[in-house]
Amino acid sequence: MADPLSDLAFDQLFREARTANAWQKTDIPEVMVRAVYDLMKWGATSANISPSRFLWIRSDAAKAKLKPLLMEGNVSKVLDAPWTVIIAWDEKFEDKVPELFPHNPDAKNWFTDEDTHFDAAFRNGTLQGAYLMMAARALGLDCGPMSGFDNDAVDAEFFAGDAKMRHWKSNFICALGYGDDAALFERSPRLCFDDANVIL
């Protein structure tokens, strides 16, 4: 069995990790976001379906396209971040199931029901978005996740006209970089065990 991580690791991933609201002017090389993906991809999903897809925003031109689709309070969080990733899920994720679940290629047919298909894609895609945040924190980056944007407009602007992305649907956005601690809000409380848990 593996040993527990150190207290330092617990702090970096959870206890001291904060949602960044502003960013240091420090560039993040592309190799770093590739490392984030290469770490997060090992997180578990149902039947390894891995339905999440990621559009990485770095250029000023791409940020300019995204800007009018954001809630006003999120604009600077995106424009000032070295990277922002649109975490999406693929409506055609089942096409990859024979590759990702090779011992049972027929598993793609588990998702023919419309509700089952959506639930699997959205649930596991959201889970992978959380894995991405934990991978980024593990690699020393700060995260600024947000849901304040127009999903339909983002899908139309970035995905609809592209052959590779036309079946992607945006879930949430996460800015990445080195956060400016001076802009952190006071930390909000969390529920205690007894308020959020039941043991039978």
Image (cartoon, rainbow, N blue to C red):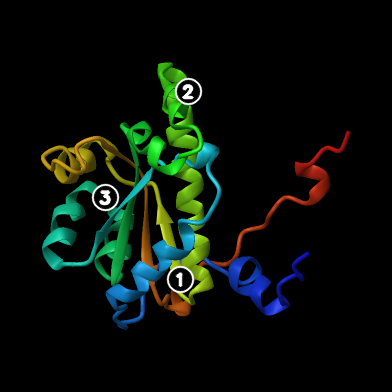
Image depth: mark 2 or mark 3 in front: 2
Q: Which residue is mark 3?
A: 70
Q: Amino acid at mark 1?
A: Asp
In this rendering, position of residue 160 left or right of residue 89 = left
Which mark's residue is nearer the viewer, 3 or 1? 1
Few, some or many C-alpha atoms within 10 Å of disc 1 (few <14, some 14-19, many ≥20)?
many
Q: How far is mark 2 from mark 1, CA to CA? A: 37 Å
Viewer-closest of 37 and 68: 37
The Cα–Cα distance between marks 3 and 1, rounded to whole angstroms, is: 20 Å
Q: Secondary structure at mark 2?
A: helix
On screen, residue 102 versus residue 200, left or right, reads left
Tell me if 165 is positioned left or right of 169 in this view: left
Say what secondary structure mark 1 lies in: strand
Q: Which mark is residue 62?
A: none
Tell me which label, 2 or 1, sits earlier in the chain. 2
Residue at the image point whose x is 47% and y is 49% from the top: 128
| Residue sitting farthest toward the right | 200
Outermost residue toward the bottom? 26
Q: Which residue is mark 2?
A: 110
**Disc 1 designates what residue?**
142
The residue drawn where x is 22% and y is 47% is: 69
Q: Say what amino acid the circle numbered 3 marks.
A: Leu
The outermost residue toward the top is: 113
* Residue 19 visible in rendering: no
The residue drawn where x is 24% and y is 35% is 167
* Residue 117 in picture, x, y percent from top left: 43, 25
* x and y percentages locating residue 183 in the rendered image: 44, 73
> Foreground: 124 or 79?
124
Q: Visible in this render: residue 35? A: yes
- x and y percent of residue 189 in the render? 67, 57
